[in-house]
Image (cartoon, helix red, strand yellow):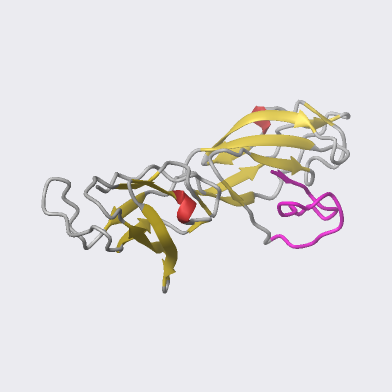
Amino acid sequence: FHNSIDDVGNFLPVGCRYGTHDDASDSCTIDAADLLQCCIKGSGLTEPVVGFTKESVTVSNGTVTNVAASAEAENAYDVWIAPTADGDITVQIEANKVKDLAGNDNVASESLTRKCDITPPSVTLSSNIKMDPFGPNDLIGNPFTVTVTFSETVTNFTASSVTVSNCTVKSVSPSTGAAKIYTVVIEPPDHDDVIAISIAGGAVTDLAGNGNTASDVLT
């Protein structure tokens, strides 16, 4: 995604373009698949400069992977940052990192901080019904529930998110007061068979867009 800087030196939120804006509190979320791309224009870059490279950018909890002149605004650069871990990423251009055409050093910019989430959600399956493929089978024709618990809030969890074998998903509903827990009603076959239930990797995403890891298979 692409963040821009307004006329007063503030970073614009996701989806905004260069213009007039004055809110330094805007924030955004990034995931493991996306690199934080910031259009830097402000203190120290208000005129043409020379020598602006990856080494000109100071980053905590991340690594600068590329720097290029931006087409978004005059005297602007795009800086790609790969996050290191969950948490805040802070970006700054410290003083004396570049020079203008007259040889003057830049002054330090303000710091830009963004939240980072690169951890995929995990998921577990449980049921109060004993599912023993080698023992007595009292599930024939009797629907039962499976509790699906994610490690964090996810989006787009539906019946199609559940992988089943020799049974069908009758319904999926979120648990009251717990956005990361769902109740899945399973319709077993009307004959003896081994059924299997699981959540495949990437079936859903968290709020940052990270796909889930695969669950164990419940049989």
**Which residues, given as a range, are shown in magenta?**
1-24
Q: Quadrant of residue 45?
A: top right
Residue 202 in the image: x percent, y percent?
Answer: 47, 42
Whether 17 is among the magenta residues is yes
Whether 26 is among the magenta residues is no
Give me the residue at 34% from left, 58% from top.
187
Q: How many marks?
A: 0
**SS assignment for the magenta stretch, majority:** loop
Left or right: where 206 falls relative to 109: left
Give me the residue at 69% from left, 35% from top.
79
Residue 172 in the image: x percent, y percent?
Answer: 43, 62
Q: Quadrant of residue 47?
A: top right
Towards the viewer: 181 or 87? 181
**Outermost residue, front side:** 191
Q: Is residue 132 above or below residue 62?
A: below
Residue 21 in the image: x percent, y percent?
Answer: 82, 60
Residue 83 in the image: x percent, y percent?
Answer: 54, 39
Q: Is residue 88 above or below residue 142?
A: above
Q: Is residue 104 above or below residue 125?
A: above
Left or right: where 121 falls relative to 104: left
- Quadrant of the drawing holding the N terminus: top right
